[in-house]
Image (cartoon, coloured by chain):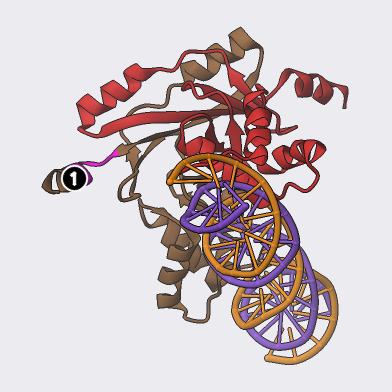
Chain colours: A brown, B red, C orange, D purple
Amino acid sequence: MTKFSSQREIVANIICGTHQHLCADEVLFMAKKVNPRLGIATVYRNLNYLVEEGKISKFRDANQGYIFDSNIEKHYHFQCMTCGMLYDLPIRYNSNLDDMINRELQLEIDTHETMFYGTCKKCQMTKGEN
Amino acid sequence: MTKFSSQREIVANIICGTHQHLCADEVLFMAKKVNPRLGIATVYRNLNYLVEEGKISKFRDANQGYIFDSNIEKHYHFQCMTCGMLYDLPIRYNSNLDDMINRELQLEIDTHETMFYGTCKKCQMTKGEN
DNA sequence: CTCGATATCGATAACCATTATCATTGTATA
DNA sequence: TATACAATGATAATGGTTATCGATATCGAG
């Protein structure tokens, strides 16, 4: 039986109240502003609870560690290889791909994750200056 | 200036002579059969050299750590969430996606990586038995 | 309201994959 | 061969995540 805790509420509010992609350290940093005694273990615990409950998702980027995402709709990401910034891409999830592979290769496809890599607008301009 | 070493040759032969996806531990295990003194640092060093030289590629799966892949053609992967097995998918890389995003969102897209998740044929059958 | 069961916290140890260090060994060229 | 230096390999360090466990907080029963 799951009990209320202010720490869980803080973590949930941080990750759900933002449309950014946050790593555990960033969540900890923000959580400490509300409750400075809150620790990294509590952050991971509650982020993983939220993932299990399907309220947020997590994925990996080009670097080490997990990125936590309050957007649980299936969607695609872009990461700038110069500054590391992560963006959601405003293109629709192609579920036809899953169906097609399911049908043609007899695999049970649940989902797919796609990460686009390249250079963001800001870094394209900065490059030109050098 | 890069010099010959038998260890580098062993690692290169293992990863290039297979069509599997190998993690560093697996490469070490196979390399030790040829030269038992070969260490994990040498495995990583030489795998990363090969990646830098563009002779192999590396990516992440659902678990921790890197997967090294001798197939440097852009292609898609499938991972069975039951047994963890990784497969190349026999569908062509959709470079139109990169071009489309490049054009419509003014991002400089170099590439994209897609991982499909689901259940492989073998595990579909095993599931039915329970 | 108080008590007791137990879920949660949080400091920190443990873990695991990867990378860095550095004395030793191997390679190649003058 | 002698010399320069690239590469090795044992191991320490690193960094992110998870496990441990005594202390604390929550909540339902009485």
Residue A73 showing in the rendered view: yes
Query: As displayed, is residue B130 above or below residue B92?
Result: below
Residue at 47 percent of width and 79 percent of height: A35
Image x and y of residue B83, in percent = 75, 32
Residue at the outermost top position: A104
Residue at 68 percent of width and 30 percent of height: B14
Q: Is A14 placed left or right of B48 in the picture?
A: left
Q: Which residues are magenta?
A: A119-124
Q: How many numbered marks are there? A: 1
Image x and y of residue B10, in percent = 68, 34
Which secondary structure is most common in the magenta stretch? helix
Q: Quick one: A43 or D30, which is closer to the camera?
A: A43
**Residue A123 in magenta stretch:** yes
Image x and y of residue B53, in percent = 46, 34
The residue labelled by disc 1 is A127
Dot 1: within a 10 Å radius of its alpha carbon, few (fewer than 14), some, or many (20 or more) residues? few
Residue at 21 percent of width and 26 percent of height: B104
Kind of residue indicated by mark 1: Lys
Q: Quick one: B36 or C6, which is closer to the camera?
A: B36
Q: Quick one: B101 or A56, which is closer to the camera?
A: B101
Residue at the outermost left position: A129
Quadrant location, the N terminus of chain A = bottom right
Residue at 21 percent of width and 25 percent of height: B103
Query: As displayed, is residue A54 above or below residue B123?
Result: below
